[in-house]
């Protein structure tokens, strides 16, 4: 296959890479050796250099070993963007463990599925979530919960919030104690790196993504997938040098995009400014306070900033590059934001099954707004016919976007049938409908799957359908994404009530909030007498 897109690559970008066989944990060791005093993480005014970051990774890694975590064991994280999520991720990788990221907004039912499906034995959770997790713990295989507080990294920590946790800061808590403070680990365990042989082909992460069946799937990512994807990303930005960039960490690290940004910072030797609550004003404050240069975000972040009443109060002039992903970004937003800051916004494309980055507009080349840009080095794409996956479509014609590259995962964990549908002969069938132009730029025009993208979050309507179907007053229901000026899309639910029953939007909203993460709850409801169906009785979602 002719890679027509390489002709459009930016200046200095290699067409093919000579990959290092190195895990991200070893990348951190190397970055620490090269510039130990360079700033690595910034949180609430507290700056952590690479040496301190690496030391804490070793301490937590040694603690996990003392708890009985062995190579291949799963460590679940339930954390916002605070330093613990970065340290815990790399500590798990350092001992050959598997990181299982979880969304703190998920309901107990959603978390129970992911904990059990992954086989996680240790959970590192934010303190506010620990009471819920203690109740959930007997339903899972989790043996130990490590409590992380925001105050752990504040200059003036508040009082102890968990009196039931052992307070003896000098005592190494034995593994039979099932709730342990994060700060206890840092004060009790050695900074010496543990001795562990971790291979590039070993599993590094189970990255959970929603499924059209309503059941989340664990994407199996190897150390090689993650490391090589970051090497591709760095090769795309040849002008960026170590220690020269301050990167905004507004994307949640539990999301594949946010984890990619963290790993890029470790590889590039850049400082990452962690934001646990990325509202428009908090983003602007962080940019002005830390002089952020690189801002990866989702379109709703740029929209909210442009529409914020306090926009003119903050100096955003330090920005020189932004990356927009997870959802299409309106062209007028791109133009207005670039006019405001002078920073170029590059749209790209990622998918959890590909670690996640696969395509982006070039920095030192032609930026085509509305497209997702060009495939990364060593990433091959094709557009296949919707009715024949073996037939490749000509330029400009719609088809399914199919991807092959070193960042593509091997499949889904314990889901052979789903793996067989999505991964074929090394190719990843994305489910997205796309076109490619004569210069190799890709445009996403539709989705084969019924996925809804609201504020950058992937929402799968079948999951909402099933929750609504379980309501005793509902005969049938169907959720669908509808345009929304702020979120890009929002969820609308079409509902058929049981005959003679009364049901209000308020009642349904309350019900959905009890069974779904907040961002999945429908914001619009429409009551119908019946739903459109095919001849075989299948609900025709697109006809609604």
Image (cartoon, rainbow, N blue to C red):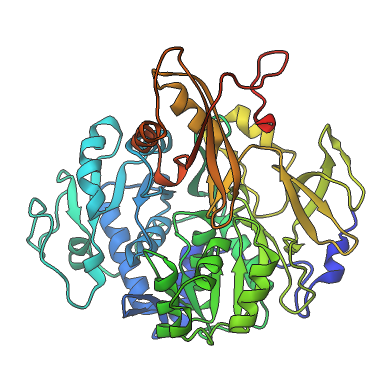
- Left or right: 105 as drawn, with respect to 445: left
Q: Which residue is pictured at 62% across the width and 43% down the height?
A: 410
The part of the image, by quadrant, that contains residue 348 is bottom right
Near-viewer residue (15 or 480): 480
Near-viewer residue (45 or 369): 369
Task: Provide residue 519's location: percent of width, then percent of height.
Answer: 44, 47
Task: Provide residue 538's location: percent of width, then percent of height.
Answer: 65, 19
- Mark yes or no: residue 385 visible: yes
Q: Is residue 508 above or below residue 227?
A: above
Q: Is residue 129 above or below residue 156?
A: above
Near-viewer residue (173 or 120): 120
- Mark yes or no: residue 346 visible: no
Q: Quadrant of the C terminus?
A: top right
The part of the image, by quadrant, that contains residue 149 is bottom left
Q: Which residue is pictured at 56% across the width and 19% down the height?
A: 529
Task: Provide residue 465's location: percent of width, then percent of height.
Answer: 51, 28
Q: Is residue 332 above or below residue 34?
A: above
The part of the image, by quadrant, that contains residue 148 is bottom left
Task: Provide residue 397's location: percent of width, then percent of height.
Answer: 88, 47
Q: Is residue 235 above or below residue 452?
A: below
Near-viewer residue (483 or 319): 483
| Number of on-image labels | 0
């Amino acid at each position: 296959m002719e890679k027509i897109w390489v002709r459009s690559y930016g200046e200095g970008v290699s067409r093919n890479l000579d990959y290092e066989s190195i895990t991200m944990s070893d990348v951190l060791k190397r970055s620490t050796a090269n510039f130990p005093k360079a700033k690595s993480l910034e949180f609430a005014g507290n700056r952590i250099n690479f040496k301190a970051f690496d030391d804490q990774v070793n301490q937590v890694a040694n603690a996990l070993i003392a708890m009985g975590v062995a190579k291949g064991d799963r460590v679940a994280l339930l954390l916002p963007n605070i330093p613990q999520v970065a340290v815990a991720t790399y500590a798990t990788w350092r001992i050959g463990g598997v990181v299982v990221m979880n969304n703190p907004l998920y309901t107990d039912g959603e978390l129970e599925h992911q904990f059990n499906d992954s086989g996680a034995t240790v959970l590192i959770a934010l303190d506010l979530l620990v009471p819920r997790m203690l109740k959930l713990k007997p339903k899972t295989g989790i043996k130990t919960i490590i409590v992380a507080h925001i105050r752990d990294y504040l200059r003036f920590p508040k009082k102890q919030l968990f009196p039931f946790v052992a307070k003896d800061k000098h005592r190494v808590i034995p593994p039979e104690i099932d709730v342990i403070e994060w700060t206890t680990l840092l004060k009790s365990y050695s900074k010496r790196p543990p001795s562990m042989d971790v291979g590039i082909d070993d599993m590094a992460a189970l990255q959970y993504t929603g499924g059209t069946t309503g059941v989340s799937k664990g994407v199996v990512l190897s150390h090689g997938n993650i490391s090589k994807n970051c090497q591709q990303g760095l090769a795309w930005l040849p002008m960026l040098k170590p220690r020269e960039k301050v990167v905004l960490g507004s994307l949640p690290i539990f999301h594949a995009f946010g984890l990619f940004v963290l790993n890029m910072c470790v590889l590039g030797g850049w400082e990452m400014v962690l934001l646990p609550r990325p509202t428009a004003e908090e983003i602007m404050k962080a940019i002005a306070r830390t002089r952020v240069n690189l801002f990866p975000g989702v379109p709703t972040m740029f929209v909210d900033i442009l529409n914020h009443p306090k926009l003119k109060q903050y100096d955003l002039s330090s920005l020189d590059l932004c990356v927009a992903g997870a959802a299409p970004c309106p062209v007028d937003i791109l133009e207005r934001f670039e006019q405001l800051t002078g920073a170029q916004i590059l749209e790209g494309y990622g998918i959890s099954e590909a670690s996640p980055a696969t395509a982006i507009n070039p920095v030192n080349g032609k930026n085509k707004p509305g497209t997702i840009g060009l495939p990364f080095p060593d990433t091959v794409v094709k557009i296949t016919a919707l009715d024949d996956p073996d037939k490749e479509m000509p330029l400009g014609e719609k088809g399914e976007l199919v991807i092959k590259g070193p960042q593509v995962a091997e499949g889904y964990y314990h889901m052979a049938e789903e793996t067989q549908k999505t991964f074929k002969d090394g190719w990843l069938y994305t489910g997205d409908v796309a076109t490619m132009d004569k210069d190799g730029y890709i445009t996403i025009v539709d989705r084969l799957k019924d996925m809804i993208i609201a504020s950058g979050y992937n929402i799968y309507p079948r999951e909402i359908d099933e929750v609504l179907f379980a309501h005793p007053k509902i005969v049938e229901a169907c959720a669908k994404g509808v345009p929304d000026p702020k979120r890009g899309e929002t969820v609308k639910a079409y509902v058929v009530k049981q005959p003679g029953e009364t049901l209000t939007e308020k009642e349904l909203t309350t019900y959905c909030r009890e069974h779904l993460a907040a961002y999945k709850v429908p914001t619009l409801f429409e009551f119908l007498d019946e739903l459109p169906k095919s001849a075989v009785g299948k609900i025709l979602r697109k006809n609604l």
